[in-house]
Image (tube, grey):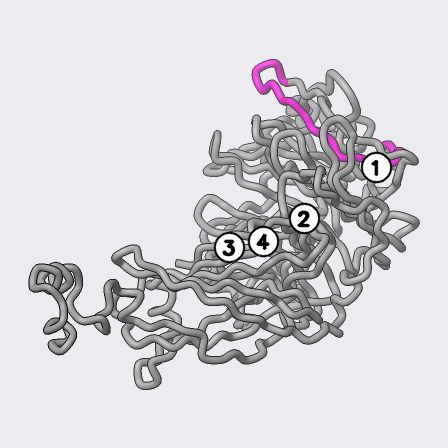
């Protein structure tokens, strides 16, 4: 305590002040000792990213740094925020001790907008410091600008809750793109030629190349690195990536002894390119058909797109895989052995003529079977959810049945009874007027009773529609984009992008 001041105060009061904290200049907690502040900012790799420079006198007791972006006026998506833990800050080299500065990326900015941010530095003693900063992001002019100006058929309103706030657009014109449910573009990766096969891991996007067996990692600051798969037999990725049991489920083409294996191989890979496990659907079906007394040669045809895998997911509830063969059916496999558990599809197709496959088929007891389906997922109660395109097969052998074609497309939800060997379509949504989207497209449950539906090939492959609909058929939003042959929109998934913790 200042001695001169103590001379003019009663002794008891001086003693109390000294006990409560000593000098007026002495910090009372770790936040005050650190004297954190925003020292500057710099543009990032894209308009959706910037780097903040934070001054910090003392790093030892820092626990985390977080930020929140104030939503644009008239929007209703939850604010985008992110937290960087101390472990992440140390690992990324964000702390620069010689300068007493932290370099922290902020992502999810609105392009062409003065973004208001609230930045919080938190410390081990639970003390915090709050900072306000404005980041003026430039306009975005890259290939993903098509998402900036949707045709708004139904705008999200304050009273509409779609059950999610951010969605990942898998496309063939840019890197992975993230929209909020107000239709605002909030993130896009550096321009690459292909990002159909994309998975978000919580701190980075991973995308498989359509031309090489390479996995591209996009960090949230916009930088990217490429890793080659640890096997020479795979030639390229196609369609999609999803979470596996140990790594990522990748749909790959391969070349074996000069023979092309087209869209019939599923591989679990690590993000470092390690090959963890493989399921060769040609071998699996040959073996099953031979064991059932059938000749598989006119069904399994190497060099032809006989299977056309377009979606595959891991089901932890029973350690299984669900795989979509657009040409034939949905197939359930045992994860460990690859044994076929059941088939679900249009029984007027060529596959159903084989007794060995017919014996594996589920009976559809209500609604319509999957026809040319895409985007498998498991609903919150364990039902199977998919987009039912309704388009017959196009790669069946000459003289065999391609199956049915419907005049409309719709999301479908199936309850499956494996003991009874039955499947019932328990929910579907047919828009008014009906929309036909024969290829690509997707549907996902966001929260129970709410769905994100994408018609990627509407209007004869010229338009894409993204809508949120509940089980009663009520729309939370409906956006439309130009889309030639699924280039701008292949499928769209809800993504947990709004409140990230980077560890």
Classify residue 18 as left or right of residue 238: left
Q: Could you classify mark 1 by the number of other residues whose Cα lies within 10 Å: few (under 14), some (14-19), or many (20 or more)?
A: many
Q: Is residue 340 above or below residue 255?
A: above
Counting residues from the N terminus, which is met first, the one under dot 4 or under dot 1?
Answer: 4
Image coords of residue 148 (percent x, y): 77, 62
- The disc at residue 76 is 2
Q: Main secondary structure of the magenta part?
A: loop
Image coords of residue 230 (percent x, y): 48, 64
Counting residues from the N terminus, which is met first, the one under dot 2 or under dot 3?
Answer: 2
- The disc at residue 469 is none
- Residue of label 4: 79
- Residue of label 3: 201
1 vs 3, front mark: 3
Give the SS element for disc 2. Answer: loop
Report how far apart the C-alphas of labels 1 and 3 lie in the structure. Answer: 30 Å
Counting residues from the N terminus, which is met first, the one under dot 1 or under dot 3?
Answer: 3
Give the SS element for disc 1. Answer: loop
The image quadrant of residue 343 is top right
Report how far apart the C-alphas of labels 2 and 3 lie in the structure. Answer: 25 Å
Report how far apart the C-alphas of labels 1 and 2 lie in the structure. Answer: 29 Å
Give the SS element for disc 4. Answer: loop
The image quadrant of residue 286 is top right
4 vs 1, front mark: 4
Q: Could you classify mark 2 by the number of other residues whose Cα lies within 10 Å: few (under 14), some (14-19), or many (20 or more)?
A: some
Dots 4, 2 in contact, CB < 8 A: no
**Residue at position x 61%, y 35% in the image:** 447
Q: Which residues are magenta?
A: 402-421
């Amino acid at each position: 305590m200042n001695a001169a001041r103590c001379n003019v105060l009663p002794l008891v009061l001086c003693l109390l002040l000294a006990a409560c904290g000593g000098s007026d200049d002495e910090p009372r907690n770790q936040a005050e000792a650190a004297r954190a502040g925003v020292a500057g900012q710099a543009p990032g790799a894209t308009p959706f990213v910037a780097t903040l420079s934070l001054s910090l006198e003392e790093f030892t007791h820092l626990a985390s740094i977080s930020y929140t972006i104030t939503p644009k006026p008239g929007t209703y998506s939850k604010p985008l925020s992110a937290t960087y833990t101390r472990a992440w800050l140390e690992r990324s080299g964000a702390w620069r001790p010689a300068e007493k500065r932290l370099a922290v990326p902020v992502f999810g900015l609105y392009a062409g907008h003065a973004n208001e941010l609230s930045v919080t530095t938190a410390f081990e003693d639970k003390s915090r410091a709050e900072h306000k900063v404005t980041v003026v992001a430039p306009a975005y002019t890259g290939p993903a600008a098509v998402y900036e100006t949707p045709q708004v058929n139904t705008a999200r309103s304050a009273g509409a809750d779609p059950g999610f706030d951010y969605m990942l657009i898998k496309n063939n014109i840019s890197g992975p793109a993230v929209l909020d449910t107000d239709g605002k573009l909030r993130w896009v990766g550096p321009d690459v030629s292909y990002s159909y096969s994309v998975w978000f891991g919580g701190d980075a996007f991973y995308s498989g190349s359509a031309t090489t067996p390479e996995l591209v990692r996009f960090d949230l600051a916009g930088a990217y690195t490429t890793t080659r798969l640890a096997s020479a037999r795979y030639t390229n990725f196609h369609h999609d990536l999803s979470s596996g049991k140990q790594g990522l489920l990748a749909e790959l083409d391969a070349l074996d002894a000069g023979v092309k294996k087209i869209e019939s191989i599923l591989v679990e890979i690590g993000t470092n390119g390690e090959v963890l496990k493989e399921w060769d659907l040609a071998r699996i079906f040959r073996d099953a058909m031979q064991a059932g007394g059938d000749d598989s040669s006119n069904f399994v045809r190497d060099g032809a797109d006989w299977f056309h895998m377009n979606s595959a997911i891991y089901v932890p509830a029973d350690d299984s895989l669900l795989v979509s063969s657009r040409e034939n059916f949905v197939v359930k496999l045992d994860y460990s052995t690859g044994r076929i558990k059941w088939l679900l599809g249009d029984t007027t197709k060529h596959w159903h003529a084989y007794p060995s496959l017919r014996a594996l088929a589920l009976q559809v007891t209500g609604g319509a079977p999957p026809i040319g389906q895409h985007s498998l997922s498991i609903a919150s109660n364990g039902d199977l959810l998919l987009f039912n395109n309704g388009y017959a097969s196009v790669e069946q052998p000459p003289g065999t049945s391609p199956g049915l074609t419907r005049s409309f497309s719709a999301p479908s939800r199936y309850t499956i009874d494996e003991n009874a060997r039955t499947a019932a379509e328990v929910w579907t949504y047919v828009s008014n007027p009906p929309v036909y989207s024969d290829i690509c497209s997707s549907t996902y449950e966001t929260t129970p009773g709410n769905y994100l539906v994408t018609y990627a090939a509407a209007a004869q492959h010229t338009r894409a529609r993204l809508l949120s609909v509940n089980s009663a058929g009520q729309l939370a939003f409906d956006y439309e984009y130009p889309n030639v042959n699924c280039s701008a929109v292949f499928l769209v998934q809800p993504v947990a992008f709004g409140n990230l913790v980077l560890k």
